[in-house]
Amino acid sequence: MKLADRMYDLGTETAFEVLAKAKELESRGVDVIHLEIGEPDFDTPEHIKEAAIQALREGYTHYSPSSGIIELKDEIARNLSLSRGIQFNADEIVVTPGAKPILFFTILACVNPGDEVIYPDPGFPIYESVVKFVGAKPVPVHLLESNDFSLDMEELVSKISDRTRLIILNSPHNPTGGILTSEDLAFLSEALMNRDCLVLSDEVYSRIVYDSPHESIVSFPGMKEKTILLDGFSKTYAMTGWRLGYAAAPKAIADAISKLMVNSNSCTATFVQRAGIEALSGSQKPCIEMVEEFRKRRDLIVAGLNSIDGISCRTPRGAFYVFPNITKTGFTSEELAASLLKETGVAVLAGTCFGRHGAGYLRLSFANSRENISRALERIATFLKVARTASA
């Protein structure tokens, strides 16, 4: 069967492929420790689930406006105004079934074939995938371990050309846990002041930070008019399966994203949107407690990885991933990830799943219990010790 040519430019998200392999092993009785998937292992807080149940009982089972119900959009605008320190209005908000459609819709709405899009590498693989899908040119910026996996803003600015239409930022960053500082964002916002260039700021991990408050480029002078802010509920509120995300964007772009919603999903499930209102307006205690537990897991897994010969790991400052350097193990990223799953039942991702500059690294999610993280570290250390002995 012949598919449209553009389908051959569309990539995938390897985490789900590795998850499928891991689940298949589990079905055969293998004890698998899941460090591959970017999903909190916490349950959705009870008050959010109860809000959805109540919404179902009250009949919130029909269409909503394509851009979202006004009550949720108002609550998102209020929340963003407080957290980003700049005023947002409901007509600048579009609610979508998950945050990923915002990435897709923004690039569809704003980027023409032949335009250039700058993005981080290693980075979320869907960035490059969708850029290629629309016929634009991907322009990666190499994130360096020596720079704590933060974007080198001078290098980024040097890559801006007359064809640059969009710059994608992701802070806190998947897969490395790096963040952008206020100084980074001030430098970039100044460089963009007189350029006809938009920013897509992926901030889905904005509430999962450990060492300093989250900084957003939208907060800097002149940037609200140039920025599409992408955020959602999946990570902060352990709502991955609920599929609830949103964009905050200049009204013309928000209207374009809403039009794409009309043409694709019609709307986001109404009772899920009601749960979103409760997530933002209700108790934040479960979220705070989850982040504190992630901090303990982060410290455990970083210390454990650094104790294994051949592995070194920097401490992530946000999100729930580590990105250890494995170049001294003698394995490539792909070889070690595949061997760990097959030989030890530890599911991780090769750094190259996130771009060519991920070579020499693995991504491990610490969204799993401390007990399981400790078990995984023991298995990894034992595997590498045996491998060194065998090659000696």
Image (cartoon, grey):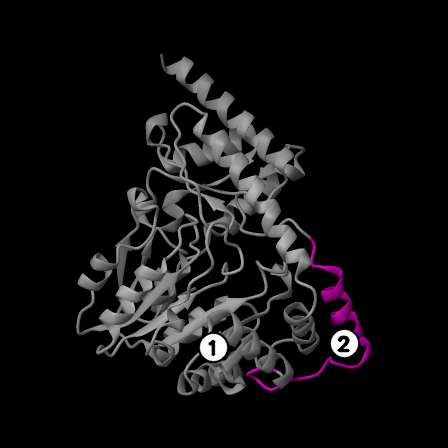
Q: Give the residue type that dot 2 points to.
A: Ala
Q: Quadrant of the N terminus?
A: bottom left
Residue occupying the point 78% across, 81% down: 59
Q: Position of residue 96 (x, y in %)?
A: 55, 74
Residue 233 is drawn in which quadrant?
A: bottom right
The secondary structure type at the circle numbered 1 is strand
Residue 130, x across and y down, in percent: 38, 66
Q: Residue at x 25, y 73 (%)?
A: 192
As rendered, which of 114 and 228 lies closer to the eye?
228
SS under mark 2: helix
| Distance of label 2 from label 1 (alpha carbons) | 25 Å
Nearer-the-camera pick, 137 or 93: 93
Occupied quadrant, residue 157: bottom left
> Which mark, by number, is residue 248?
1
Residue 12 shown left or right of residue 290 in the figure? left
Residue 87, image x and y in percent?
47, 81
Mark 2 vs mark 1: which is more N-terminal?
A: 2
In this rendering, does residue 377 appear at all?
yes
Left or right: 213, with 149 as reference point: right
Residue placed at 35% from the left, 34% from the top?
Answer: 332
According to the image, label 2 marks what residue? Answer: 55
Determine whether label 2 and label 1 are within 8 Å by CB: no
Q: Answer few, some or many: residues within 10 Å of disc 2's Cα (few below 14, many 20 plus, some between 14 and 19).
A: some
Q: Is residue 214 above or below residue 175?
A: below
Look at 42% across and 32% down and name the residue there. 336
Identified by mark 1, the residue type is Ala
59, above or below 45, in the image: below
Magenta region: which residues? Answer: 43-68
